Amino acid sequence: MTAKIITVTSGKGGVGKTTATANLAVALAQIGQRVVCLDADIGLRNLDVVMGLENRIVYDLVDVIEGRCRLKQAMIRDKRFDDLHLIPAAQTRDKNAISPSDMMKLGEDLRDEADWVIIDSPAGIERGFRNAIAPADEILVITNPDVSAVRDADRIIGLIEAEQKEPAKLIINRLNPAMVQRGDMLDAEDVLELLAIKLIGIVPEDENVIVSTNVGKPVALDEKSRAGQAFRNISRRLMGDEIPLLNMDFKDDFLHKLSRMFK
Amino acid sequence: MADWLKRISGQTGSADEAKERLKLVLIHDRTDINPETMEELKDDILKTISQHIAIEPESVKITMMHEGREQRLVADIPLKHYDRKKVS
């Protein structure tokens, strides 16, 4: 069995890379897939806390690359799924501790360990980003519907093209349907038209994401959460299933209905 | 949407402005051409073409367009109108 390697990246920080990585990993594990997720944000480790595994860390990514431990020793098993593992980033080192070729080699070694390897990229366009995308078979660019996140996503998409990688696919995160309806937030269609890449999912803004991060339990495990559902849908699309987009229709109030009539 | 409706429903429609601004910013980011360079380019093109053929400089339109992720420079350069009788 040989794993497919996916990297989640964004350019801009704070748009939801780590949240998406954790949730896609959990959602894939939930449908019986063997998953290893890897935190490539060296020095700013966070995937461990988002997944609730911070207390189990002994070895990290840099330990593996520098040969201080075996690969399996750095793979922390998830609390909920036996076939979900995390390789945490080193916290006291920086991005220059490893190179894109180190990551390529690690990626190849991980192919035998799982069905999916999901890499959480650091923000930015420098070494850390290049390390994170080096071993990727598929790259997911995540953005928010705002001017700075979309602009940075466009830069990243250009850099991925220049690396001659497969065209990236887009996740639009934190879409607020009420604001879109008011005309105060870019709609998914606007973002797609601007960035001109394929969409793999739209995740609505959802307070449950913060709550789930507080307790280290990714929102994909919450059956009722809309964001959780969106991440579960993306994981099915990664598997090749045709899943329709979530209905983002916001409850119409009277004025919106009226304004539509005059459109 | 009617303006008065936008006002009473508290809509500012700022998303349209965001999209328009982004369109321009992305063109410049992707091509590394700023408006000043664009003007210089336009002048150079006009100068070169004028050496060979008479054109209407005021009606020239040179713009950056994009189709998907492809950028293209589109020039619309009307030639000077001649009265055939006078010429012959």
Image (spheres, helix red, strand yellow):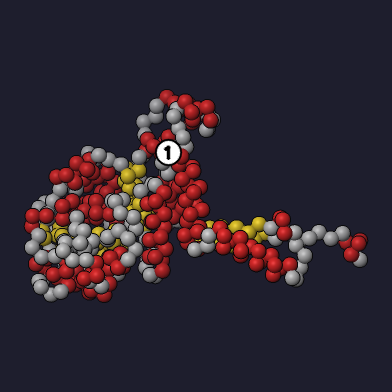
Camera sees residue B36: yes
Using a 10 Å C-alpha cutoff, classify the residue at mark 1 as few (fewer than 14 neighbours), some (14 to 19) or many (20 or more).
Answer: some
* Among the 4 quarters of the image, the one containing residue A64: bottom left
Residue B38 position, x and y percent, is 58, 61
What residue is drawn where x is 30% and y is 64%?
A129
Q: Secondary structure at mark 1?
A: loop
* Among the 4 quarters of the image, the one containing residue A18: bottom left
Q: Is residue A260 left or right of residue B59?
A: left
Work out whether residue A44 or residue A1 is closer to the camera in this orientation and state it. Answer: A44
Residue A246 position, x and y percent, is 33, 43
Q: Amino acid at mark 1?
A: Asp
What residue is drawn where x is 69% and y is 65%?
B46
Identify the chain of the residue marked 1, using the numbered disc in the image: A
Q: Is residue A231 left or right of residue A253?
A: left
What residue is drawn where x is 45% and y is 42%?
B15
Residue A176 position, x and y percent, is 35, 40
What residue is drawn where x is 57% and y is 60%?
B36
Q: Above or below — where is A182 with respect to A5? A: above
Residue where numbered disc 1 is placed? A184
Camera sees residue A28: no
Residue A183 position, x and y percent, is 44, 37
Q: Is residue A231 left or right of residue B17?
A: left
